[in-house]
Image (cartoon, rainbow, N blue to C red):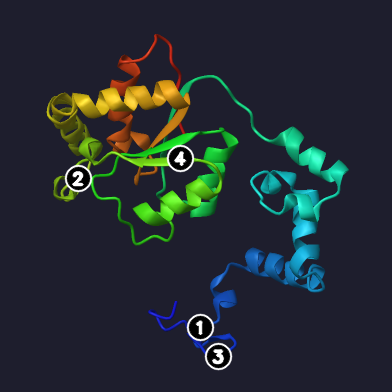
Amino acid sequence: MIKYKLVKEDANDWIIIDSLNYTKTLNKKDQENLSTFAVEFKSLRGKPLIRYVYENYPFYAIKSEIAESILNPEKLKRVLLITPRKTEPTIFTIGYEGKSVERYVTDLIREDVKLLCDVRKNPLSMKFGFSKNQLKGILEGVGIEYIHIPGLGIDSNKRQELKTQDDYEKLFVEYEQTTLKQNTGDLQALAQLFQRSKRIALTCFEGDHHSCHRSRTANALQSLLPHNTPLVHL
């Protein structure tokens, strides 16, 4: 935010220097919701605010490191009861296009994903939270393992002229005939990771799995696993 001249720092505080009134950029309904929120919760700060969230939306406490110090035993039990505990071995795929990192990670937590396999060739992103080290740190903070497998990615220069679904299909046929056939070791390693972790997700950028090579990677992985291993696109 300092880089983009949105805030500056003095000895004690962060100071907003951006002159844009972001409230006015919202639609009328969102402005009303924001105003209502500000009035209703203006007296809550720190632990009381956290307690309100955890008691009314216990899902958001399931990965909390401070829940035990915030909630009484009865409320804490509610959190434990709704914690996802899914055991069926399943392959997931997920893209982060159009998602905040909070929404993205929440989708993984809801499905009790144990391991995220990043199949981007270059795991860098201008979007907060989705570059390799950022994403790895965020995921490990909620108990999800992160592994980068660049050998199963597609060079970014091959994506420059994609305009139609037919263009994508041609690229993915080439991907299946070259990258996947030339990187059977990475696919075998991915299959071993699946056998170990049982619930894994393959990730790349595109929101629509039809427009992303991760769907073809997932199909190739599925062919190496026991028959009827479920594949779910988040």
Q: Nearer the viewer, mark 4 or mark 1?
A: 4
Distance between the Cα atoms at labels 2 and 1? 36 Å
Secondary structure category for the residue under label 3: loop
Distance between the Cα atoms at labels 3 and 4? 37 Å
Q: What x and y, as percent, mark residue 117?
A: 37, 37
Q: Mark 2 or mark 3, which is nearer the start of the sequence?
A: 3
Q: Mark 4 or mark 3, which is nearer the start of the sequence?
A: 3
Distance between the Cα atoms at labels 2 and 4? 32 Å
Secondary structure category for the residue under label 4: strand
Q: Nearer the viewer, mark 3 or mark 2?
A: 3
Give amino acid for label 1.
Answer: Leu
Q: Nearer the viewer, mark 1 or mark 3?
A: 3
Residue 11, numbered circle:
3
As displayed, is residue 64 above or below residue 33?
A: above
Label 4 neighbour load within 10 Å: few <14, some 14-19, many 20+: some
As displayed, is residue 64 above or below residue 182?
A: below
- Quadrant of the drawing holding the N terminus: bottom left
**Furthest-bottom residue in view?**
10
Secondary structure category for the residue under label 1: loop
The residue under label 2 is 162
Left or right: residue 100 versus residue 164 is right
Residue 20, numbered circle:
1
The residue under label 4 is 145
Label 3 neighbour load within 10 Å: few <14, some 14-19, many 20+: few
Residue 183, numbered circle:
none
Label 1 neighbour load within 10 Å: few <14, some 14-19, many 20+: few
Q: What x and y, as percent, mark residue 226?
A: 39, 10
Task: Kindly identify the residue that appears in the image at 81 percent across and 68 percent down.
Answer: 40
Give amino acid for label 4.
Answer: Glu
Q: Mark 3 or mark 1, which is nearer the start of the sequence?
A: 3
As displayed, is residue 52 above or below residue 79?
A: below
Q: What x and y, as percent, mark residue 49?
A: 77, 63
